[in-house]
Amino acid sequence: MMISIKKIYTFLIIFFPILSIYRSPIASIDMGTFLICITGVAIALNKKWVIELQRKLLPLILYVVIITSISIFSVSLYAPSTTVLMRMLRFVILLGIFSFCNKDYFDFDYGVHLLQKVTVIASVYLIIQFLVYNASGYILPNFIPGLTKAQGLTQSNVLSEYANFYRPTSFFLEPSSFVYFAALMLVCSLFLQEYVEIRNKNATAILITVAIIFSTSGQGFIVAVITWGYWFLKLLIQRRPNRAKIIKITGVFALMLIIVPIIMRSEIVDNTLGRIFVEDPNAMSAIDARSGGYDVFNTLSLFRKIVGMGFGNLPDNMYFSSIADILFTLGIIGLIIVLVLYLKLFIQGKLFQKMLCVVSMILMFGGGLFTATYLLFYLSFIAYRKFELKNYKKEDGRRVV
């Protein structure tokens, strides 16, 4: 039986963050981008050029093209002009494919169930990595054997980074990348049940949370606390909590009362919180490290603060969180465009989509979520609007179509 092009497109969106780590047959293009582009061409031919764009992204796409094209010829570049141009083209092409394809070709139900399976496997593997390292000192690989890594990455590069402080990453380059991936399923597990039946959703959410804590990612820790906190608050303020919900709340709280004190006394949390807040004046916390991009932005002229330096035109020796990245490359105008985009998506979205918008903003302020890879990954779920075409009914406590 032939696999539908909708499932192929959805499969690639879910695996995009993992596939983008590896090199495609074209050396300068990662595997995820290569396969998404091929699929986009196939969909374009299949649609016979009847284009139905998701117009919400058009202001961002147009501004990226205009300001970057002008900047290549008018400002000093921090990278070769060909590199800046390639970064812009990748961003614009991938967002263009999303705008063109996602409305009709993203299979939401299939995507959620596939995401659950992949996230559970990734979470279990991260926990195994942590346990094996602490038991034997052996570091399990985070690369898929046999595939060539993009950007000159090797396993030895990764191992050298763990010489002083090991942080498990599952199948990803770093713990933050795992958090970006897993946080989406955490939100779906806790807030999506009204639209898609997710089996073992509470167990999935707990497993993901444990893996996020074991990753020692500070921003992941914050996302988990806020997501679970709102979930508890939502259950408690409901007007008529039934017996099952009362038992659920009591059970989860009892579990937390057992687990949290153990975790809070562990080295895991000490390391995680230590990366967020460092008391040593000679050391640098994760917050300090993420503020450097704003310091560089403040050195720009007023005009460049407003319009930006051009997409992808960043200093190589400085960390930029996504918000700092947007300010530096696209300016205040670009940041306003991005914030308006997410505000519209927040207002128009269902509860789980509103939560994904909040999580996205948290990860943009502290991390690097503003990339074509993770924009496609998150927006595929946030921008989905065909819930009204589903006809879920309750029978014997289960949802059926």
Image: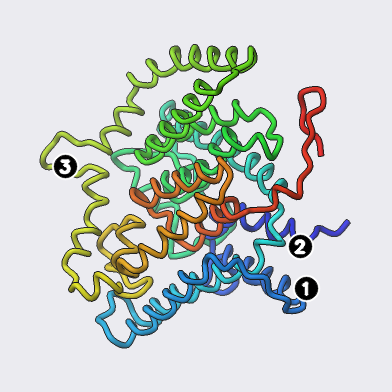
Residue at the extreme right of the image, as rendered: 1
Q: Which amino acid type is shown beneath numbered disc 3?
A: Ala
SS at mark 1?
Answer: helix
Which comes before the other along the chain, label 1 or label 2?
A: 2
Q: Identify the residue shown where x is 43% and y is 13%.
A: 257
Decide if residue 15 is in sight here: no
Asked if residue 103 is positioned above or below residue 163 in the image, the reply reads: below
SS at mark 3?
Answer: loop
Q: Identify the residue shown where x is 38% and y is 72%.
A: 311
Residue at the extreme left of the image, as rendered: 281
4 to the left or right of 139: right
Examine the image and state in which quarter residue 264 appears. top left
Closest to the camera, between mark 3 and mark 2, is 2
**Residue under label 3:** 283
347 to the left or right of 302: right
Q: Which amino acid type is shown beneath numbered disc 1?
A: Asn
Residue at the extreme bottom of the image, as rendered: 73
Which comes before the other along the chain, label 3 or label 2?
A: 2
Q: Which amino acid type is shown beneath numbered disc 2?
A: Ile
Closest to the camera, between mark 1 and mark 3, is 1
**Residue under label 1:** 46
Cα distance, mark 1 to mark 3?
56 Å
How far across and down, in percent of the image, does residue 265 sit?
32, 19
User: Circle 3: is it few (<14), some (14-19), or many (20+) Cα within 10 Å?
Assistant: few
**Residue under label 2:** 5
Along the line of sight, the residue nearer the viewer: 59 or 266: 59
User: Circle 2: is it few (<14), some (14-19), or many (20+) Cα within 10 Å?
Assistant: some
How far across and down, in percent of the image, does residue 45 sit?
75, 77
Decide if residue 181 is in sight here: yes
